[in-house]
Image: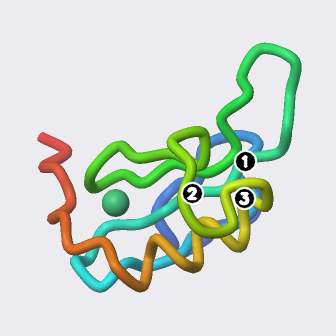
Amino acid sequence: MPETTQPAWPEGLTARYLTVGGSTVGVWDADEWSPVRALCSGCIASNRDGGPGSSDPHRWAQSHAETCRAMPRPTA
Ligand SMILES: [Zn+2]
């Protein structure tokens, strides 16, 4: 495993979008156990909740990141 300066990404995460509130929207590869493809770490919205671009996780993530002002949850 090469060293990285970025925070660890969960396995299967393919992209992260920074929201205006400072949270991130993660986009995961599809798999058989979870239909969630894009999930906001700030407000826990996902592309399953609908909204603009909900059929395309990357589009949904981009669109949500531009409007979500939820603060990131503390990790500790
Ligand atoms: Zn959000």
Can you say whether 34 is above or below 74 in the image? above
Q: Amino acid at mark 2?
A: Gly
Find out if the beta carbon at label 2 lies less than 8 Å from the nearest ligand 1 atom: no
In the picture, the disc for residue 26 is 2
Decide if residue 60 is on the left or right side of residue 25. Answer: right
Amino acid type, mark 3: Pro
Nearer-N-terminus badge (1/3): 1
Q: Which mark is residue 57?
A: 3
The residues tagged by marks 1 and 2 sit, at their Cα atoms, a distance apart of 7 Å
Rendering quarter of residue 21: bottom left
Query: Which mark is on residue 69?
Result: none
Image quadrant where one finds the C terminus: top left
Q: Amino acid at mark 1?
A: Trp
Q: Which residue is mark 1?
A: 28
Among the two numbered marks 3 and 2 on one chain, the one whose residue lies closer to the N terminus = 2
Residues at marks 1 and 3, CA–CA distance in whole angstroms: 8 Å
Callout 1–callout 2 Cβ contact below 8 Å: yes
- Taking the image as shown, residue 68 lies to the left or right of residue 54, namely left
Q: Is residue 74 above or below residue 22?
A: above
